[in-house]
Image (cartoon, helix red, strand yellow):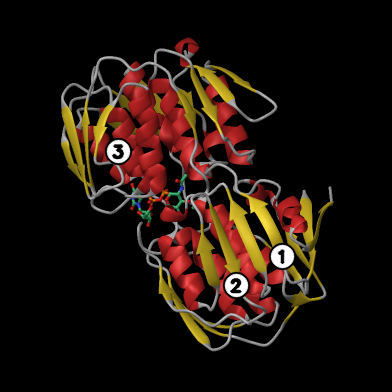
Amino acid sequence: MAKILINGGPVLQGEVWISGAKNAVLPILFASILGSKTSRIGNVPHLQDVTTSVELMAQMGAMISIDERMRIEIDPTTLNNHEAPYDLVKTMRASILVLGPLLAKHGRATVSLPGGCAIGSRPVNLHIHGLELMGADIQVRNGNIEAIAERLKGARIVMDMVSVTGTENLMMAATLADGITVIENAAQEPEVEDLANYLIAMGAKISGAGSHTITIEGVDELGGAEYSVLPDRIEAGTYLVAGAITGGKVKVTSVRPETMDAILDKLQEAGAKITCGDDWIELDMQGRRPLAVNLTTSPYPAFPTDMQAQFTALNCIAEGTGVITETVFENRFMHVQELQRLGADIQLEGNTAIIRGVEKLTAAPLMATDLRASACLVLAGLVARGETSVDRVYHIDRGYEVIEEKLGQIGAKIRRKQIT
Ligand code: EPZ
């Protein structure tokens, strides 16, 4: 176990290089199972969830190698085990993304039900319903999803709710189905589009990815592909908030600004001067305290739920009162009680947090509860007087590559302390 210790106060200045997107690389790794040839994936972030995914695929028999630059080579043709066991799935819910590829390529899959997590019950009924519409026979018993399909058939699927991995699972399954699949009310996240681009590079016939209607014409076989994962817009947004919360000037590089409009709009509302190039974004607070912002989380292209905790932290020390409403997950304010330990003035009313900005926060020992909440607590520690400790940092390592190095590079007084 480890803790992250932060001494608040420094104004952050400098450049941060952004890694590949966690929520793109995970579906892309599992999508390689659909291929009949080797794939090579680049710009892979060094994250616990990537390690877990590689372990899962190796356990299923795929041949995987990773070089020193985190480029992953996957030969899926040796895969001979169609099970994703509970001991791995329980550590990473995204393991559900093996379901579609295994079923489409091998005609069967046994995947442990992911179960809930800190932020919500996280059901997978939309994944299962969509596969059943495509002709899969699915039984849920003993905590497992047991799926069989001779060959999936194309279907028209209207998603009850916008689901990112639901859309991804069904899109992957449809690439090898017999006929055409149309997914209506599809998730439009850039990570969905990135997955589609990788599948197309493998030979899939997909149109409309990134819109609310995706059409997939099934083919008999997919090859392999060389592919580089898109940059992580949530990691980039997190470091821009680090600049904003300390009143500093931070430039994030190797990003796609066009995937971050909703985040950049809110940062400008908070008083940041934002300039963008093709693959970089610079935030300059000009030494000013941020202004409080109101926001409501919604599916892309609206404000992302994965940036909600970070903006809750920003509002804690902003000028004025900010109202944040979380509409995607039912329990994504676990960070509020931790922020209150630092002296934040936050009132929770259902799925809304009313945050009255205070002049200063005071350091305290904190407990991380989930990935983005832990990033939020680190951000708050950057401006809390004294030394803040964030415990259970395994949460943060799932989604942020060497966060203390990247923050340290731009002036944060931050270090990791092993405790057991
Ligand atoms: C993906 O989770 C991301 N994870 C999440 O990122 C992200 O917060 C979320 O999308 C929303 O953008 C990955 O991509 C690996 P959903 P996912 O299905 O796909 C309900 C992070 O911090 N729902 O879009 O699991 C669900 O309960 C993580 O990087 C059903 O009811 O989220 C939620 O209320 C956290 N039934 C809503 O839909 C289903 O079958 C949206 O969930 C599926 C989802």
Given the image, on which type of amino acid does mark 3 rest? Answer: Ile
Distance from label 1 to label 2 (Cα)? Answer: 19 Å
What residue do we see at 66% from left, 46% from top?
A: 401
- Mark earlier in primary sequence (3, 1): 1
Question: Which circle marks residue 313 in the picture?
Answer: 2
Question: Which circle marks residue 128 in the picture?
Answer: 3
Q: Is residue 233 left or right of residue 158?
A: right
In x, y percent, where is residue 334?
56, 67
Distance from label 3 to label 2 (Cα)? Answer: 36 Å
Q: Name the quadrant containing residue 205.
A: top left
What residue do we see at 69% from left, 77% from top?
A: 341
In x, y percent, where is residue 97?
42, 35
Given the image, on which type of amino acid does mark 1 rest? Answer: Gln
What residue do we see at 39% from left, 18% from top?
A: 35
- Mark earlier in primary sequence (3, 2): 3
Distance from label 3 to label 1 (Cα)? Answer: 47 Å
Q: Nearer the viewer, residue 394 or 299?
A: 299
What residue do we see at 55% from left, 74% from top?
A: 272
In terms of secondary structure, where does tag 1 sit? Answer: strand
Label 3 beta carbon less than 8 Å to ligand 1 = yes
In terms of secondary structure, where does tag 2 sit? Answer: helix
Q: Name the quadrant containing residue 137.
A: top left
Q: Which residue is mark 1?
A: 13
In terms of secondary structure, where does tag 3 sit? Answer: helix
- Mark earlier in primary sequence (1, 2): 1
Label 2 beta carbon less than 8 Å to ligand 1 = no
The mark closer to the camera, 3 or 1, is 1
**Looking at the picture, does residue 312 appear above or below residue 419?**
below
Q: Is residue 68 left or right of residue 211?
A: right
In x, y percent, where is residue 49?
58, 39
Q: Are marks 3 and 2 in contact (CB under 8 Å)?
A: no
**Looking at the picture, does residue 294 appear above or below residue 61?**
below
